[in-house]
Image (spheres, grey):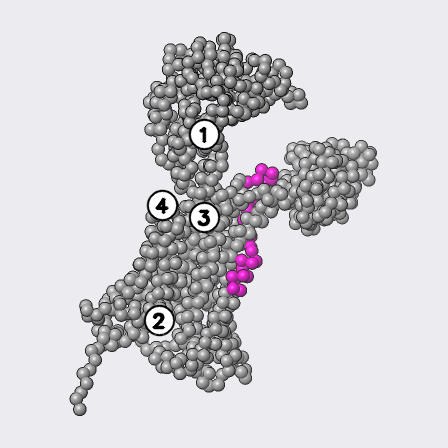
């Protein structure tokens, strides 16, 4: 018989390094296309998120800054240069300074001084000349709201009048009209209100001179009314009704002020009016060029132009010694934004570090899964003489060919989807993802086959921690302790947060993982013996299988803990912001609603208010503010209350659940019992102290101390006494109305502010009505705050997705062995429902460990980090002025603790049950043959 030729051995069979003509990478990718595609998709999504995050943060910050500046008026977002010109200040060349050529030349020089980051919108730049002081218009036909109070007019000369107006009647003014006369145009609104028409003459009084006659030659309609051209003067489009300054407020005098437009070549005619003219060059900021990262540089650039060295150079270049540059609000808009951004940025950084850590862990788990799939093949290659270096090069090429193109696609998508000016951070983030995804599979594979050893069962229960592991764990604990202490000491209010302190929640989760892995074997060992005595097979097998969990379960546990910790931290941030605003609204009102009067409230108002819908209880209080102690001089507020109703108010608002109402009704040795603030308690001591109220003096004795009181302004001292006790001891005060309440505090759900306001104003128009829900609604987020919250929620959601993916990868890693075990048990007669329970019990201890550990870690991280995380900048645009509201801190959100953990448990149980069901349908033979191959 003729012998058949032996097949040519491949590199995977003979254990030698593949030859140059062997397509190693192509062969391996074709061998497992599903795994390569899944890894490519994971890298693409991770690279996209990593590259999009810094760009999204930049985009939302830039949008917030531009929105803040764009909502301001043209004057408030402009940099303006002005020059006062008169024959007194420039006796030889005053008229030449206000010509169109001179104004344009100065504008050209000014633009040469404007450099980034300061960007001005040249399309909106407007310059011209206006009268320095409004001139009285003496014509009798002009309207006078107050007799003998003539209207006043401002005359403006701006170029390009024909481009920004539509002539309704007459024509546009011309430059030459003779000595003492100038042609002018007014808007339709001005002509209607001031009784002007084409041909009207307005005589403007000059400062001791003959004045100026202004002939109206045209009535115009503004084009592009929102442009800076029409916002130089507040009444350029329509007259304004003004009040004569220095008059009696009870009898004010009014007059009309209007503006007229003349040809820019006739500006010299205005020099004869009082105080001459003011030349101006107004430059609105280019909102499209503003970036949040250049906010501080923008403020510095504005300062250099207004009062720095560039201001002196500008005067020298133009030759105008009186030229000044001012900004009426741009710096005041940008500078607070920069401080707010510095305070909110660390919070996003904390979330970014957390989700970045989870993403890296998921990539490492994907590498672990790929290495486990290839371990048998690599062990065979190593046994046949393959070198580590050759394997490393080929494995790296294989993983890089999968990861690098996917990361590049993710980067390109991020650059296209989130357009911003910066891209270096996005490229670096996507490059880091590609590096981790490329290196993780070959490094893990080579570590597993560096030394070929016989296969031994490895599990968490039997594993004994080495000394190196103990030292490493102690090191991690020390690092985490330092990070937490640094965050508690430094805080986030000033933006001073580095990578170590930003990673504090992640490091706390790492410590929790270390502790849980140390404790995990103990309950399994305790359950093993009792479970073995049971008659059924499900629970003993489940406990035994859980104890055989591989030691590599550290990564999924760490991913779950980090993701749940970051999620709970995010929930604590949002809950703290909401709670801070609730406290601010309560501090502003004092209750769910309040009515305050400058003196005593109208009689019977409390009864009418009590019957309104939504009002549950009413507490009348008399407040006398600004009293002083003797001799210390401590300022305090005196509260005269009905103890029972005030105690209910304090309990309903959450200020004080145990207000000592009974103690206020008593007194001894002629002194009235009082509840005082801590500082006054030290001042009063145990002896009676004189209180000088508006009705007279009386003695009080401190019987209780409270840090806060309902209706009291936070941070102020207070004395609370019983109005009933005072009325009983001083009936003449009650008859004189000296004990009548000055405020009503209401509690209840859904109090209608309009009805309450109408009822109060029917009694007196001088009453002030505040509703807590309205005050809470007024505390809206700024564009930066809402954008930061949206980014934070997106980051937390991404972390939750990676957490679920880590759990699925963990289940997938043990899936082959689990299928083999279930198939073998089925051949032994185990029923389908029992196999499903066994599949759940197989991984349930580890999932429970991660879920419960995540809940406990999230619960612990809030008090640990609360002193160092200041959320005030995220809750308020600025600290409310109505009260000294305490710093807004983290507040535990139960839903953020429970829901993610419950979701993970549900997902894990569903996957395990589905796998047990599919195992029964696939057939025992296939699964058992797969086990033989393994």
Q: Can residue 256 be seen here?
A: yes
> Residue 422's mark?
4
Count residues near mark 3 (Cα–Cα under 10 Å), then give few for <14, some for 14-19, many for 20+.
Answer: many
> Residue 346's mark?
3
The residue located at (54%, 79%) in the rendering is 530
Q: Toward which corner of the image does residue 741 lie, by quadrant?
A: top right
As helix, strand or loop, the secondary structure at mark 1 comes to helix
**First of labels 2, 3 by sequence position:** 3
Q: Is residue 627 above or below residue 158?
A: below
Residue furthest out toward the front = 169
**First of labels 4, 2 by sequence position:** 2
924 on left or right of 389: right
* Of the two numbered discs 2 and 3 in the rendering, the one whose residue sits closer to the viewer: 2
The residue located at (49%, 67%) in the rendering is 907
Count residues near mark 4 (Cα–Cα under 10 Å), then give few for <14, some for 14-19, many for 20+.
Answer: few
> Residue 372's mark?
2
Quadrant in which the N terminus is drawn: bottom left
For the magenta stretch, what is the residue range?
A: 879-903
Magenta-highlighted stretch: main secondary structure?
Answer: loop
**First of labels 2, 1 by sequence position:** 1
Mark 1–mark 3 distance (CA, rounded to whole Å): 38 Å
Q: Is residue 94 magenta?
A: no
* Of the two numbered discs 4 and 3 in the rendering, the one whose residue sits closer to the viewer: 4
């Amino acid at each position: 018989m003729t012998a058949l030729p032996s097949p040519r051995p491949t590199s995977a069979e003979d254990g030698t390094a593949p030859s140059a003509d062997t397509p190693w990478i192509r062969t391996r990718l074709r061998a497992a296309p599903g795994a390569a595609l899944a890894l490519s998709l994971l890298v693409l999504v991770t690279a996209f998120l990593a590259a999009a995050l810094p760009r999204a943060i930049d985009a939302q910050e830039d949008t917030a800054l531009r929105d803040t500046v764009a909502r301001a008026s043209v004057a408030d977002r402009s940099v303006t240069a002005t020059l006062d010109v008169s024959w007194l200040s420039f006796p030889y060349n005053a008229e030449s300074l206000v010509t169109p050529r001179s104004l344009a030349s100065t504008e050209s020089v000014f633009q040469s001084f404007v450099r980034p980051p300061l960007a001005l919108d040249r399309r909106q730049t407007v310059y011209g000349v206006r009268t320095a002081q409004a001139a009285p218009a003496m014509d009798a036909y002009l309207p006078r709201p107050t007799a003998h109070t003539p209207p006043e007019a401002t005359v403006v000369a701006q170029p390009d009048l024909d481009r920004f107006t539509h002539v309704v009647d007459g024509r546009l003014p011309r430059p030459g009209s003779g000595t003492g006369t100038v042609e002018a145009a007014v808007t339709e609104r001005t002509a209607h209100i001031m009784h002007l028409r084409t041909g009207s003459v307005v005589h403007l009084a000059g400062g001791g001179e003959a004045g100026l006659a202004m002939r109206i030659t045209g009535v115009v309609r503004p084009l592009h009314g929102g442009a800076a051209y029409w916002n130089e003067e507040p009444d350029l489009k329509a007259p304004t009704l003004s009040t004569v300054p220095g008059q009696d407020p009870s009898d004010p005098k009014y007059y009309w002020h209007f503006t007229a437009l003349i040809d820019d070549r006739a500006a010299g005619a205005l020099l004869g009016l009082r105080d001459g003219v003011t030349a101006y060059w107004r430059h609105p900021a280019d909102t499209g060029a503003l970036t949040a990262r250049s906010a501080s540089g923008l403020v510095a650039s504005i300062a250099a132009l207004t009062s720095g060295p560039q201001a002196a150079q500008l005067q020298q270049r133009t030759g105008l010694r009186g030229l000044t540059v001012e900004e009426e609000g741009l710096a005041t808009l940008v500078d607070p934004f920069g401080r707010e951004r510095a305070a909110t940025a660390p919070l996003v950084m904390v979330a970014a570090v957390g989700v970045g850590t989870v993403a890296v862990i998921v990539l490492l788990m994907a590498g672990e899964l790929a290495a486990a799939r290839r371990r048998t093949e690599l062990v065979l290659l190593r046994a046949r003489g393959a070198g580590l270096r050759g394997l490393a090069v080929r494995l790296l090429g294989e993983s890089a060919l999968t990861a690098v193109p996917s990361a590049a696609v993710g980067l390109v998508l991020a650059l296209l989807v989130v357009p911003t000016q910066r891209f270096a951070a996005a490229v670096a983030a996507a490059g880091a993802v590609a590096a981790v995804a490329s290196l993780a599979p070959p490094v893990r594979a080579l570590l597993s086959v560096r030394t070929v050893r016989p296969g031994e069962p490895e599990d968490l229960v039997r594993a004994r921690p080495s000394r190196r592991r103990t030292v490493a764990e102690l090191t991690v604990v020390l690092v985490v302790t330092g990070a937490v202490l640094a965050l508690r000491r430094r805080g986030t209010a000033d933006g001073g947060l580095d990578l170590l302190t930003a990673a504090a929640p992640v490091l706390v989760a790492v410590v929790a993982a270390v502790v849980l892995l140390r404790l995990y074997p103990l309950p399994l060992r305790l359950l093993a013996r009792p479970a073995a005595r049971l008659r059924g097979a499900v629970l003993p097998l489940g406990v035994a299988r859980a104890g055989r969990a591989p030691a590599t379960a550290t990564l999924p546990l760490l991913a779950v803990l980090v993701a749940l910790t970051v999620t709970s931290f995010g929930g604590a941030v949002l809950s703290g912001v909401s709670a801070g605003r609730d406290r601010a609204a309560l501090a502003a009102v004092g209750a769910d609603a309040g009515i305050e009067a400058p003196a005593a409230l109208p009689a019977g108002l409390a009864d009418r208010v009590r019957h309104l819908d939504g009002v549950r209880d009413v507490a009348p209080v008399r407040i006398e503010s600004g009293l002083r102690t003797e001799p210390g001089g401590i300022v305090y507020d005196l509260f005269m209350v009905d103890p029972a109703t005030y105690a209910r108010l304090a309990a309903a608002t959450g200020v004080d659940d145990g207000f000592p109402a009974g103690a206020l009704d008593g007194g001894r040795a002629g002194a009235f019992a009082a509840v005082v603030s801590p500082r006054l308690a030290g001042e009063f001591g145990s002896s009676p102290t004189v209180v000088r109220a508006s009705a007279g003096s009386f003695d009080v004795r401190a019987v209780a101390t409270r840090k806060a009181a309902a209706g009291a302004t936070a941070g102020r001292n207070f004395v609370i006494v019983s109005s009933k006790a005072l009325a009983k001891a001083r009936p003449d005060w009650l008859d004189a109305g000296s004990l009548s309440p000055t405020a009503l505090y209401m509690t209840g759900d859904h109090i209608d502010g309009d009805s309450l306001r109408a009822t109060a104003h029917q009694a007196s128009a001088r009453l002030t009505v505040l509703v807590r829900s309205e005050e809470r609604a007024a505390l809206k987020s700024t564009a930066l705050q809402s954008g930061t919250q949206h980014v934070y929620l997106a980051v937390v959601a991404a972390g939750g997705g990676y957490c679920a993916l880590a759990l699925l990868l963990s289940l997938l890693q043990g899936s082959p062995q689990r299928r083999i075990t279930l198939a073998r048990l089925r051949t032994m007669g185990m029923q389908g429902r029992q196999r499903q329970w066994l599949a759940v019990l197989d991984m349930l201890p580890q999932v429970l460990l991660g879920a419960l550990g995540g809940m406990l870690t999230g619960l612990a991280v809030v008090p640990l980090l609360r002193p160092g995380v200041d959320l005030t900048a995220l809750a308020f645009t600025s600290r409310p002025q109505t009260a000294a509201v305490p710093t807004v801190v983290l507040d535990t959100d139960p839903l953020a603790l429970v829901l993610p953990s419950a979701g993970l448990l549900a997902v894990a149980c569903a996957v395990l049950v589905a796998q047990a069901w599919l195992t029964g349908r696939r057939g025992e033979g296939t699964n058992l043959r797969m086990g033989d191959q393994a």
